[in-house]
Image: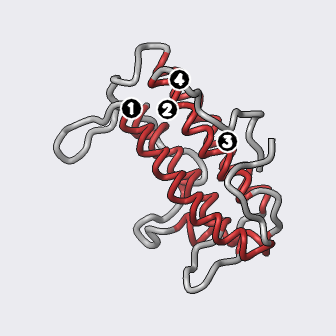
């Protein structure tokens, strides 16, 4: 699981947009490091009593990337594998099905989702700034701004990077706050 030579820090005195993009990329890089380089057993391991696995986290965050940036922001339909999942039968399908996927499949799924997300954000930013509204409307008919979606993703990654910290340490003792440069 890799990230494309990304900086590990948001700019010290950047614009709001630069800071948000840098913060999201930092969280992605931390997550990639905490979940990367493991075999199937490592990705299926949990830290009891929790049943969370690193593989489940990888697949979940791939889903979240596609949900927020592809579906909500752009208003596009699901792609594979999300479009073939039976969400009614198993609303937590991504968590449960990750155990059936190889490390290569999980890492590729996440990397492809983050690539789509970067492209979606870049396309939207070409037409304006963080105030742009998403195609998605909630039950009250309101659309979140790109700013809100970015904050939601930063929070999601930060939360799950903490989970990954605990699970990864229990798998092979890897600790630390930042990926090696």
Looking at the rendering, which quadrant does residue 23 occupy? top right
Q: Between marks 1 and 2, how big is the CA–CA gap?
A: 8 Å
The picture places residue 61, in percent across and down from the top left corner, at 56, 53
Q: In the displayed orientation, state which residue is furthest to the left.
A: 140
Task: Determine crowd level at label 3: few under 14, some 14-19, many 20+ residues with C-alpha closer than 10 A.
Answer: some
The picture places residue 181, in percent across and down from the top left corner, at 80, 41
- Who comes first in sequence, dot 1 or dot 3? 3
Q: Which residue is mark 2?
A: 20
Looking at the rendering, which quadrant does residue 167 occupy? bottom right
Q: Check the image and report above or below for 62 versus 73.
A: below
Task: Determine crowd level at label 2: few under 14, some 14-19, many 20+ residues with C-alpha closer than 10 A.
Answer: some
Q: Which residue is mark 4?
A: 13
Q: Which residue is mark 3?
A: 112
Q: Check the image and report above or below for 96 versus 70.
A: below
Q: Say whether marks 3 and 2 touch (CB < 8 Å).
A: no
Residue 147's label in the rendered image is 1
Element at label 4: loop
Q: Say whether marks 1 and 2 touch (CB < 8 Å).
A: yes
The picture places residue 2, in percent across and down from the top left corner, at 77, 45
Instruction: Give the mark toward the camera: 4 or 3.
Output: 4
């Amino acid at each position: 699981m890799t990230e494309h030579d990304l900086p590990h820090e948001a700019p010290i005195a950047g614009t709001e947009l630069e800071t948000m993009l840098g913060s999201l990329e930092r969280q992605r890089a931390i997550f990639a490091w905490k979940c990367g380089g493991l075999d199937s057993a490592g990705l299926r391991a949990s830290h009891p009593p929790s049943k969370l696995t690193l593989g489940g986290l990888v697949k979940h965050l791939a889903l979240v990337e596609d949900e927020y940036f592809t579906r909500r922001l752009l208003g596009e339909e699901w792609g594979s594998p999300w479009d073939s999942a039976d969400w009614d039968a198993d609303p937590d399908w991504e968590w449960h099905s990750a155990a059936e996927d190889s490390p290569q499949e999980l890492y590729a799924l996440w990397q492809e989702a983050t690539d789509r997300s970067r492209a979606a954000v870049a396309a939207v930013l070409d037409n304006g700034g963080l105030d742009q509204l998403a195609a998605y409307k909630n039950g009250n008919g309101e659309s979140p701004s790109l700013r809100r979606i970015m904050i939601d993703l930063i929070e999601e990654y930060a939360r799950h990077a903490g989970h990954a910290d605990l699970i990864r340490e229990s798998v092979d003792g890897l600790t630390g706050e930042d990926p090696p440069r």
